[in-house]
Amino acid sequence: MIDEGLRNELAKQGVVATSLQELYNWGRSNSVWPLSFGLACCAIEMIAASMSKWDISRFGSEVFRPSPRQADLMIVAGTVTKKMAPQVVRLYNQMAEPKYVIAMGACAISGGPFKQGYNVLKGIDRLLPVDVHIPGCPPRPEALLHALVTLQEKIAKQELTGPNRPRHLRADLPSEFPVPEYGEHDLVPAKNETLWQPEPVVRAG
Amino acid sequence: MPIPNPEELKTRLEAALPGVRVEVFPNPAVPAQSSLLIAPAEAVAVAKFLQDEPQLRLDMCSNVTGVDWPDREEKVKVKQLVDGVEKEVEEVRRHPGCLEAVYHLYSVALKQGPVILRQRTANRTDDTAVASLTPVWRGCEFQEREAYDLFGIRFTGHPDLRRILMWDEFKDHPMRKDYVEPDDYEYEPTPHDEVLDRAKAHYPAPEVKA
């Protein structure tokens, strides 16, 4: 790796020194194209974030793609009902690697106000690997922009080689996840056991 | 002209349609919107009359919903002669449950309403049929499907009786009082009350100190 001070000196002289990894991550993290896909009221905030007042295009994500084949980011904006969950997973499976998921709002994180209901999934992270969670009901557009910047920082830090390289550079990790089926009482399976492994709850009493 | 009260409606219905049984189902709460309990076999005839009668012209069904009345037991004190002496004895009376379909009708033409109709099923298990009023008010279609989906009320004469909110493979009726939801309470960050009790069953067993 080049010395940071030397690199700054070179930059002042008009010489840009970089690594392939930095260039690759710089390019990817500044053009994260979301899938245009909204499930509930959070989608209204997502639309507001893409309009001129909050202007998500400042961060390179204004190109909402209507096809999962062209999208890098799935913003799960809203309540995921059990009836909708298989379609959400199927859309994710159809996206090309590298792909990322932002769970936007209380419902997408945990089921939110509908958590104990009969028809709402208790968080999309039971079925999909979520990169950034945004709390809020609904979160403000600023919160969505913050999540996007958080995701960009995460992408910029990814290593292209070595054991910590991301999933899309590893053949042994899955890029598709099983689509749950409609059962007689619930989704079958209701959660992806390999993905959803919460910390055990330890409480006094 | 204001809408007639339920007692008046009952007498008019029974005069216009001989043999029809109508029962006024009182509502003691503040809105005092009493309703008319009608038999499923006569429901379509009653509905057509309410729609066509020039002074009512109930042309819109704004809402269809269901009510679940579970089986209940009532303890009543009854005086009985025991060995020639009159004594108070407790007796248990069983009231079999039923499902109810409730319709709220308005007249857009005369700007009045609502008139509330109720139909009851024979029981909650195997005979849950009432008459569909979709042939009379087209707007009932989706709402009757919702009542079928969530309560399990079967509407005979409905053109397309399928589930509308839950998926077709689903077997339960979630708005019934005895609905048992899937037991997936393994991770509850802030449980309380009933949720706490149900979540506790999934907590890891406490470590036994040697």
Image (cartoon, helix red, strand yellow):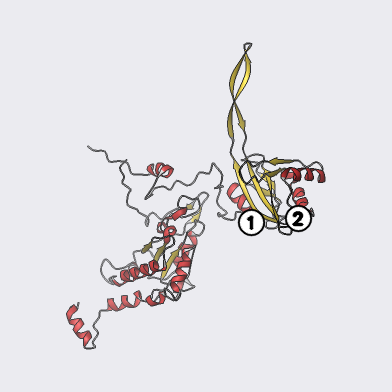
Q: Mark 2, residues whose alpha carbon is within 10 Å: few (<14), some, or many (≥20)?
A: many
> In the image shown, does A193 or B7 lie closer to the viewer?
B7
Find residue A2 and report its horizontal and vertical position in percent: 19, 79
* Quarter of the image where the C terminus of chain B is located: top left
Question: In the rendered image, is residue A143 in sight?
Answer: yes
Q: Chain of mark 1?
A: B
Residue B170 image point, x, y percent: 55, 51
Identify whether A189 is placed above or below A99: above
Q: Is residue B48 left or right of residue B66?
A: right
The residue labelled by disc 2 is B57
What is the CA distance from the residue labelled 1 to the residue labelled 2?
22 Å
Say which residue label 1 marks: B142
Secondary structure, mark 2, is loop
Q: Is residue A192 left or right of residue A184?
A: left
Residue A124, placed above or below residue B100: below
Position in image of residue B197 (x %, y %): 40, 41
**x, y percent for residue A38:** 48, 66
Residue A130 is at least partly visible in this image: no
Which element carries disc 1, helix, strand or loop?
helix
The subunit letter for the residue under badge 2 reads B
Query: Which residue is found at the position 82% from the left and 46% from the top?
Result: B16
Q: Is residue B112 left or right of residue B169?
A: right
**1 or 2: tag closer to the N-terminus:** 2
| Amino acid at circle 2 | Arg
User: Is label 1 or label 2 in front?
Assistant: 2
Q: Which mark is residue B106?
A: none
Residue at image location 74% in from the left, 44% down from the top: B41
Type of amino acid under label 1? Phe
